[in-house]
Amino acid sequence: MRYLIKGGIVVDPVADTLTCTDILVEEGMIKEIGQLSDSEAEVIAAEGNYVCPGFMDMHVHLREPGYEYKEDIVSGTRAAAMGGFTSVACMPNTNPVADNAAIISHVLAKARNAAARVFPIGALTKGSLGKELTEMADLKGAGAVALSDDGMPVMNADIMLRVMQYASMLEMTVISHCEDNKLSEGGQMHEGAVSAMLGLKGIPSLAEEIMVARDILLSEYTGCRLHLAHISTEGSVRLVRQAKERGVPVTAEATPHHFTLTEEAVQGYSTNAKVNPPLRRQTDVEAIKEGLRDGTIDVIATDHAPHAYHEKDVEFQYAPNGMIGLETAVGLIFTQLVQPGILTVPQAVAKLTCNPHRVLGLSGGRLLPGTPANITIIDPKLSEVVDPTKLLSKSKNTPFGRWKLTGLPVLTMKDGLLVMRDRQLLE
Amino acid sequence: MFWQRKDLLGLRYLTPEEINLILDTAVPMKEIIGRKIKKTPTLRGRSMVTLFYENSTRTRSSFDLAGKFLSADTVGLTASSSSVAKGESLRDTGLTLTAMGVDVVVMRHPASGAAEYLAKCIPAAVINAGDGTHEHPTQALLDMFTIREKKGSMAGLKVVIVGDILHSRVARSNIWGLTKMGAEVRVVGPITLMPKDIEKMGVKVYHRLEDALEGADVVNVLRIQLERQQQGLFPSLREYSRLYGINQKRLELTASDAIILHPGPMNRGVEIEHQVAYGNRSFINEQVTNGVAVRMALLYLLTGGEYHALSN
Ligand SMILES: [Zn+2]
C-alpha cells in the first residue's frame, strides 16, 4: 500500500520544528518527505492537522499473562492504537512476573500482529520481590528493552546498588517505581487535607521523594541510566532538576492524571481516582507542569493500569490502585498542556516520541525517509466527550468520564498499516 | 422543616438546620425512654437491620433499643470477615437486604466511605454507625445533644477534643457538627496522632493539653486504643497519660462550669482519671441515654416521620 499524507503540519520533535509538507509511505516505510504528488498513492488529507512520529507510551500494564480479564495484549494495543500510540512498553508485573526470557518471548510472540508495537520491560529482581537479581542479559537477549519492578520499589538499597551496577554493565535503563513502602504502608491517597477529612490513611509525598533521592544517588554512584516512573510531587521534580544539573544520567516521566487532577478527585470515595502514586496537591500539579515545561520531565507516559469493574466497585480501601490512560492521554495533553501554552506542539510530541525512545535506547521517534512508517495524526480542533463505555480497553476505570477533551488523534499508522482512522479502529 | 435525605452518612453533609431538626426530634424521644412503658407504635411495620462488620456492643444495642422502643422490627447481622473473604461484596449484601424488604440499614464498617458506598448501591436508608476513621455521626449527634442540654446552645462554646484525632471518626464528626453550629473546636494530642493539615477543617490544633484546656466549656476525651503504642505512635501509656490524661488538676484550667464527655468505653487511669470520669462535671452516662434518643429520632426521620407531626 502507498499513502500520500498531504498538506499536514509535520512535527519534528528533534529539530523542534513544524513544517507544512507531505509524506509518502510505501511498503511500510517512509519513502519521501517534501512537496509531493503521486497518482498511485491513496491520499490522506491532513490539512490543519499535526503529522507526528508515532507516539510511544513507555509505561503501560497489558496484564498478559495472568490477568487477561483486565486487559490482554490484543485489547491493550487496540486501546493504544485508538489513543494514537504506535508503540507501548509494557511493565513486567504480570503473573508470572516477566523475570525470565520465556515470558518476554511469550509477550513478543503474542504481540506480533497486535495493533501497536510492544516493547516488553523485564523485571529487576526475581518475582519483583526485591531480593535477587534477574538474569538481565538473558532478558535483554529475549527482547526486553529496559528493567523495572514497577508496582514495587526495591526497598533494600544494597540490592538496588547491585541491580544498577549490573544493569549499567549491560547498558540497560533501570526504571524505578519510587516509593518507600514503610512510609506509604496502608496508605490510600495523598496525605493532606482531603485524607484528613475522608479519614483515609495518607501517603506522604516524602515516601516518593526519599526514594527519588536515593535512586539519584545510586545512579550517580554507578553511572547506571535511571528513569524515574510517574513522579508526582514538587520535591521529586526539584530533586530530578538538581540531579540533571549535576549531570546524573537520570530521566523522568509524568502521567496525564498527575498533571491534571488533584487529591480533590478522591472526594466521594471515587475509586477511579485511587492510583499509586496518589493524586497530589495543586502545588504538585503546578510543579509537574513546570517540570514538563523546562525539560526536567522528559516523558509523558500513562501508567495505563486496567482493573475490572467489580474490582473497583467496592469500598475505597479495598479497591486496587490504578486507572486506564491510553485513550485519554493525547486529549489531556492537548487540553491541559498545549492549549494553555505550557508546551509547544513539538515539545509535547517529543515527550511521546524521541524522548521515550531515547530513554529505552531505541531508534525511532522521528519522521525520516527510510525509517518504518509509524505515524500519528492529531486534529487539534477536534473535541470529544469521554464515554468510558466506548473505550476499547477491556477495563473502564477512568476518572475522566464525561470530560470534554480537545485535540485528538485521528489516524494511527503502524509500520505503514493504517490501524486507526477518523476515530475508528480498522480491523 | 422536613427531613429530605435518604441517608445519614456523616455530619459533613448536613446543614445546621438539619442538625437542629435531629436534635429537636430527639427531645420527645428522650421523654419516651424515661417512661415506664418504653414503647410507641410510631415505626410499626418498619424494618431495620444492624449490619456490623466490626464489633461494637454499645452502638449496636443502642440502635437496637431505639428501633424496639419505636416498634420497628429489628434484625442484627454480624458480617464476619469470613463472609467478606468468601467474596460477597457489600453491594450484594445490601441488595439482598433490600430484596428482603429492609427500610433502614445501620452499618458499622472498618473501611472509610463504606456507608456512602452502600447508600449509592441500595434504595433503603443507610445510617452510618461508624465507617473506618471517617465519621461516626450518631456519636457526634449525641455529644451535641448533651452539650445543648447542658449549655443551651453550641454557638461560641470552646470545645476541646483530646487524644487520637488521627484515627478517630468520633473526632471528625464532632468537628464537622460543632463548627457548623458555631462552636470553637480545639483538637489536642500528640503530633503522631494528629492528621496532617487538619486545621483546614476549621479547628485549632494544640499539642500541649494545658494550652487547649484554657477556658474550655466542653472537654471531649477520646478513647486511646492501646495498640497504637505497639504501632510506635507514642512511647508508652505512662507518657500518654502524663501528657494527655484528663485529671482534676488540669480541669481547673477550664471554665468553672465545663463539662466532660467520653464516647466510651473508657480506659480509666489512662486518658481519664477515675475521679473525673465519675465527678459532677461528667455526663458520660447521660450520653448513653442521649444516644438512644438521637438514634430514635434518626430512625423516625429517615422512615418518613415529620417533626411537627410528632410534636402535635
Ligand atoms: Zn509504578
Image (spheres, helix red, strand yellow):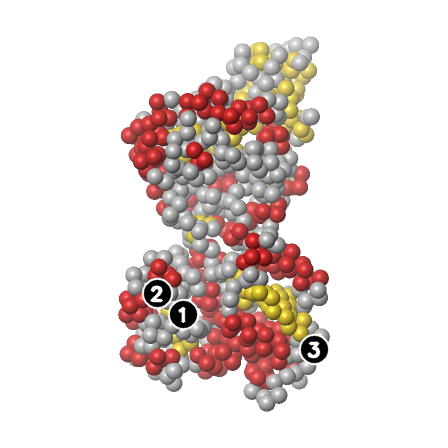
**Foreground disc of the pair 2, 3:** 3
Residue at screen point 53% across, 51% down: A318
Residue A368 visible in the snapshot: yes
Q: Quarter of the image holding residue A42?
A: top right
- Residue picked out by circle 3: B44
- Residue picked out by circle 2: B189
Decide: few, some or many residues near mark 2? Use Cα within 10 Å; few <14, some 14-19, many ≥20.
many
Whichever of callouts 2 and 1 sits on the residue coming sooner in the sequence is: 2
Q: Quarter of the image holding residue A53?
A: top right
Whichever of callouts 3 and 1 sits on the residue coming sooner in the sequence is: 3
Determine the CA span between mark 3 and mark 1. Answer: 36 Å
Determine the CA span between mark 2 and mark 1. Answer: 10 Å
Chain letter for mark 3: B
Residue at screen point 64% across, 10% down: A37
**Horizontally, is A312 left or right of A149 in the view?**
right
Same chain for marks 2 and 1? yes
Chain letter for mark 2: B
Residue that protrudes farthest toward the bottom in the picture: B36
Percent from the top left, x then y, of residue A169?
35, 22
Percent from the top left, x then y, of residue A245?
31, 30
**Horizontally, is A161 left or right of A191 in the view?**
left
**2 and 3 marks in contact (CB < 8 Å):** no
Percent from the top left, x then y, of residue B232?
33, 57
Same chain for marks 3 and 1? yes
Give the residue type that dot 2 points to.
Gly
Give the residue type that dot 3 points to.
Arg
Whichever of callouts 2 and 3 sits on the residue coming sooner in the sequence is: 3
Image quadrant for the C terminus of chain B? Answer: bottom right
Q: Residue B222 carries which label?
A: 1
Q: Determine whether A19 is above or below B156 in the image.
A: above
Element under label 1?
Answer: loop
Q: Which of A3 and B141 is in front in this view?
A: B141
